[in-house]
């Protein structure tokens, strides 16, 4: 192959690569972003409780199916899928940790709550485990189900000061992003309100 042919071959390859890049860029521009939803923190507590202890709120634990931005759907017992075209604004454990902290700030009289790494020496720690956080379809009726296991740990002794499971169920008006996330937010608010009221009297 002569020098002229080699130059022509190189130009052709570059042109094809440039065309491929433009095609991929256009394909990326054509895909619409996934609608993203957030959770709120409960507010308007009728009574503010809480003692003098400082509480550390760690990120909740969860199975891999819940440790994601995806919104869980259980179409039948033992089956797991995710709501298409919708997602949370962060991984669910991180999102719940932030909203739990805000819930305590809104409802605890002394507001002595912090995350690990905030430089606060805590006397108690709240451990949450996400048992269920998604839509469960039973007899064709979708229902938002939130179930959290809560433990208050006395850090000086390492003993469990209190433990309880909290749950809430809310009917889902529509199986789409707005309908599902609104129901889950209502259920989450109910559970977090109960956790704040229950645990605030323990520290």
Image (cartoon, rainbow, N blue to C red):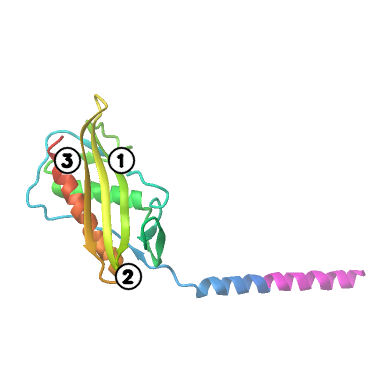
| Viewer-closest of 92 and 112 | 92
Q: Where is residue 191 in the image (x, y as percent from the top left)?
A: 21, 51
Quick one: 131 or 19, which is closer to the camera?
131
**Residues under labels 2 and 3: Cα distance?**
34 Å
Assign the magenta stretch its main secondary structure: helix
Residue pictured at 68% horizontal, 71% vertical: 18
Left or right of residue 110, residue 10 in this image: right
Neighbour class for label 2 at 10 Å: few (<14), some, many (≥20)? some
Q: Mark 1 points at which residue?
A: 58
- Direction front: furthest residue: 139
> Measured along the vertical axis of the image, is residue 5 above or below residue 119?
below
Q: Residue 166: image x %, image y %? A: 21, 48
Marks 2 and 3, the one that precedes in the sequence: 2
The label number, if any, that marks residue 175 in the structure image: 2
Q: What element carries label 3?
A: helix
Q: Which residue lies furthest to the left in this view?
A: 47
Residue 95 — which label?
none
Give the spatial CA distance, label 3 vs label 1: 14 Å
Query: Mark 3 or mark 1: which is in front?
Result: 3
Are the residues at dot 2 and dot 3 in contact (C-beta closer than 8 Å)?
no
User: The C terminus lies in which quarter of the figure?
Assistant: top left
Tell me how far mark 2 sits from mark 1, CA to CA: 32 Å
Is residue 5 shown in magenta?
yes
Does 119 sit left or right of 34 as displayed? left
Q: Quadrant of residue 197?
A: top left
User: Quadrant of the image for the N terminus?
Assistant: bottom right
Residue interval drawn in magenta: 1-18
Q: Estimate the x, y position of residue 136 in percent, counting from the top left.
A: 31, 60
């Amino acid at each position: 192959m002569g020098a002229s042919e080699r130059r022509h071959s190189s130009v052709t390859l570059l042109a094809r690569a440039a065309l491929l890049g433009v095609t991929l860029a256009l394909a990326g521009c054509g895909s619409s972003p996934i609608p993203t939803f957030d959770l709120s923190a409960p507010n308007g507590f009728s009574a503010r409780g809480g003692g003098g202890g400082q509480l550390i709120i760690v990120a909740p634990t969860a199975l891999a199916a819940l440790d994601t931005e995806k919104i869980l759907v259980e179409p039948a017992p033992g089956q797991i899928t995710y709501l298409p075209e919708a997602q949370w604004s962060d991984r669910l454990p991180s999102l719940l940790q932030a909203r739990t902290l805000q819930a305590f700030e809104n409802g605890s009289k002394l507001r002595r709550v912090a995350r690990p790494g905030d430089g606060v020496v805590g006397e108690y720690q709240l451990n949450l485990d996400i048992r269920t956080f998604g839509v469960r379809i039973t007899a064709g009726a979708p229902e938002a189900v939130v179930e959290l296991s809560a433990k208050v740990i006395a850090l000086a002794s390492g003993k469990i000061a209190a433990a309880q499971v909290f749950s809430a169920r809310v009917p889902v008006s529509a199986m789409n992003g707005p309908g599902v996330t609104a129901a889950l937010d209502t259920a989450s608010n109910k559970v977090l309100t109960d956790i704040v009221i229950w645990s605030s009297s323990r520290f």
